[in-house]
Image (cartoon, rainbow, N blue to C red):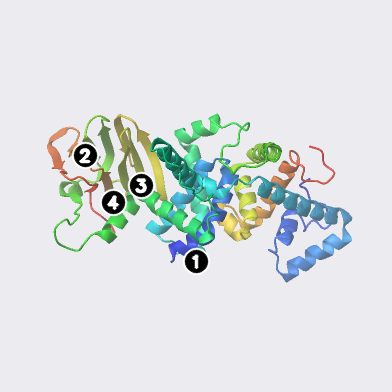
Amino acid sequence: MTANHSPDAAVDDADLIRWLDGELDDDERARVDDAVARDPALAARLEQLRGRAARLSALLQGTDPDLAVVAGVSHAPVAKVIELNAAWAARQGMPARTVPPPQPVPGWLQAAAIIALLLSASLLVPPVRAWIVGLLRPADGPGTFTPIVATPAAALPIDTLGIRFESAATTFTIEFATAPAAGTLSVEWQDVDSVLAERYSAGGGEELMRIDEGLLRIRNAAASTADYRVVLPGRVAAVTVRVPGRPDATWQFTTGAARSRTLELGPRTS
Amino acid sequence: MDAARLFEEHHGALLRYLVRLTGDGDLAADAAQEAFARLIEKPPRDERPRAWLFTVATNVVRAAANSGKRRRRILERSVTRVPVADAPRRPDDEMERRDTWRAVRSALDTLSEKERTVLLMREEGFAHREIADAVGTTTGSVGTMIARALDKLAERLPLDLEATP
């Protein structure tokens, strides 16, 4: 039942929903009120929509999962600690220490735990990690974290980027051709078995591809400034950047650091 | 912008909305996390950060659903199981709740992506203008989409008192 129900065709389902949601101004509301008062079918439709919306809300609320569990916050770690304590005590021939049952976690503690989880997980996002590293980095002195900057690439805007990844090796090989490109590309070694490439631009992030092994080739066609960032995990010892067909245009970097390094290719625009 | 305060105020509602939208607890948690990560990375100029968060998270879900990995995951997803973890409940209650969850999930899946988004953002109390911005439509068409979505769901769920679906 989606058609208009009033001889006054000006009031339709959209008006009724807007009436229910308080989206109408005084004049519009008066117009709908008047139409509903004059047309029993329209009044019935209004009640039908109101009832359906209310019962849908009840169904959704009645079947929502425990959001704390979905978010990864539960009593499971506490239970595990109790279990391990009991096992350890049994091996030692000792009675297990009495541990009170887990109490409901206060709201503020749940929020703190969720924030900690979020912040920890956000370190997996290269730009966020780079931002946090930037905040923590001392201005000068030993241990200063300095991104590796491939300055030759500044003259060679990147169009096609190829990343060769071998899971058993500790090297990245990056190839690129020359043409205008768009956005910021971040490549991260997600774990020992795969590489995750994401492209960030003004419109937000976009996962390009996850590769287990082999060659990841990315092409950016839109004309813009080139701005690529490759986040290298600590285990990467060497990086090679080259332009296919131009053996002279090769840059090699030895990271030599047991920490993540950032390789920036092309001019930064911001 | 106080990210911690925004997280405290909106993360729960955002996660609830995403679980309802996707039926996938992992994807919902990922999308909520991604939205807040982007909030920290590049705070929006928008004066409505809540609407911004929901819009970004919806776009993350949409992009994920379009990727091969997520597509496979969605295809493999079965309405015969509840894909999100949950707290222990009494067996009878749990069985009934799961049956209802499956029915709701199945009904929501019959809606178009836009209809589902519009309906579930309305559930979270967003104004029609904010919903329209999130799904890329006009404010005037939001009411029509909500009514249409309710009609579709009423064919599969007991949304009318006299109905026996």
Query: Residue B8 in the image: x percent, y percent?
Result: 50, 60
Q: Which dot, 3 or 4, sits closer to the camera?
A: 3
Please state the chain letter of the residue tagged with numbered disc 4 in the rendered image.
A
Q: In whole angstroms, how far apart are the C-alphas of marks 1 and 3?
A: 28 Å
**Relative to A98, residue A208 above or below:** above
- Would you name the residue on which mark 2 appears? A236
Q: Residue at (18%, 37%) from the top-left corner? A: A242
Tell me whether circle 1 and circle 4 mark residues in contact (CB < 8 Å): no
**On-image quarter of the C terminus of chain A:** bottom left
Please state the chain letter of the residue tagged with numbered disc 3 in the rendered image.
A
Q: In whole angstroms, how far apart are the C-alphas of marks 2 and 4?
A: 27 Å
User: Callout 3: helix, strand or loop?
Assistant: loop
Amino acid type of the residue that numbered disc 2 sits on in the rendered structure = Val
Specify whether B91 is left or right of A187. right
> Is tag 2's residue or tag 3's residue first in the polypeptide sequence?
3
User: Callout 4: helix, strand or loop?
Assistant: loop
Please state the chain letter of the residue tagged with numbered disc 1 in the rendered image.
B
Q: Which dot, 1 or 4, sits closer to the camera?
A: 1
Query: Residue A221 in the image: x percent, y percent?
Result: 34, 42
Amino acid type of the residue that numbered disc 4 sits on in the rendered structure = Thr
Q: Residues within 10 Å of mark 2 (few under 14, many from 20)?
A: many
Say yes or no: labels 2 and 3 on the same chain: yes
Amino acid type of the residue that numbered disc 3 sits on in the rendered structure = Leu
- Would you name the residue on which mark 1 appears? B47
- Would you name the residue on which mark 3 appears? A124
* Residue A239 figure quarter: top left
Q: Which dot, 1 or 3, sits closer to the camera?
A: 3
User: Callout 2: helix, strand or loop?
Assistant: loop
Q: Residue at (26%, 30%) from the top-left corner? A: A166
Query: Residue A62 in the image: x percent, y percent?
Result: 68, 47
